[in-house]
Image: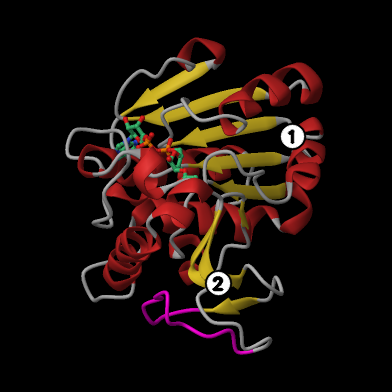
Amino acid sequence: MNEKVVILTGAGISAESGLRTFRDQNGLWEDHSIEEVATYDAFIKNPELVHRFYNARRAQLISDEVSPNPAHAAIQRLFEALGPDRFFLVTQNVDDLHDRVGTPCVHMHGELLKGRCEACNSVFDLHDPLSTESVCFKCKEKGLLRPHIVWFGEIPFNMELIYSQLSESDLFISIGTSGLVYPAAQFVREAKNVGGARCIEFNTENTPISIEFDESIEGPAGETLPGWVDHFLKQRGLL
Ligand code: OAD
């Protein structure tokens, strides 16, 4: 069997690593509205607040509190068994937890550990806090550095590649995403209608798009995914 597996992950896969999701109870959007911190207008209006929000997220991500969980490890095992031609991972997450376990992934909403200059478009690694005083290492402009994050109203990265992978998928797996943010929420439709894929959702609860999946597996991904991956690999003689 040479089936191609395409995986989409969202904030739920990192919840068991200690990172808050956006829309669950106690989610990030309970403390801040999207309009306050996750749009370009917000950045222009109140860059200090936007920097503070992402600086805090970044500091937590690189702290000892946060590390990959068994769901990230399970996806890595799937990648190692299938190889790069039969595996594609796209994440909405701006954390680096897939990267830390070695899984190649497309960060469609950007990366918290990168910054970008609005003046010259340079993208750079970022661990320190950003401020309105920060200076671009390349063009030396001050105050125009921003998190390398896709804000609402901006176009996600790598869409062409993602849609071409979806169109080739035989199995589409969505893990820990609320299905409320487009275009990611329509990937299941694309995988099903264009790729002809079987579609499986892993989530702790039903989502508005659960109905579009062939199967929904309920529970925390760190508990449900490892066993599912083992079973999948065993069935194919890959474990
Ligand atoms: P959300 O916070 O909207 O949804 C998280 C989903 O994960 C919910 O459906 C939960 O039920 C589920 N969940 C929580 N814990 C889980 C666990 N342990 N195992 C499995 N599922 C679990 O996060 P996203 O769907 O990722 O965009 O949000 C999409 C985008 O909206 C984000 O990338 C971000 C946000 O605004 C930007 O910032 C551009």
Q: Nearer the viewer, residue 150 or 236?
A: 150
Q: Nearer the viewer, residue 39 or 179?
A: 39
Across and down, in percent, residue 34 comes to: 38, 39
In what quadrant of the picture does the N terminus appear?
A: top right
Across and down, in percent, residue 105 comes to: 61, 57
Across and down, in percent, residue 73 comes to: 43, 59
Relative vertical location of residue 210 with respect to residue 11 in this rendering, above or below: above
Range of magenta residues: 126-137
Q: Quadrant of residue 67?
A: bottom left
Mark 1 surroundings within 10 Å by alpha-carbon count, few (fewer than 14), some (14 through 19), many (20 or more): many
Disc 1 residue type?
Answer: Leu
Judged left or right of residue 26, residue 87 is right
**Which numbered disc covers residue 144?**
2
Residue identified by numbered label 1 = 166
| Residue at image location 35% in from the left, 41% down from the top | 221
Mark 2 surroundings within 10 Å by alpha-carbon count, few (fewer than 14), some (14 through 19), many (20 or more): many
Q: Does the CB distance between marks 2 and 1 fall below 8 Å?
A: no
Q: Is mark 2 within 8 Å of ligand 1?
A: no
| Residue at image location 37% in from the left, 30% down from the top | 203
Q: Secondary structure at mark 1?
A: helix
| Residue at image location 48% in from the left, 39% down from the top | 231
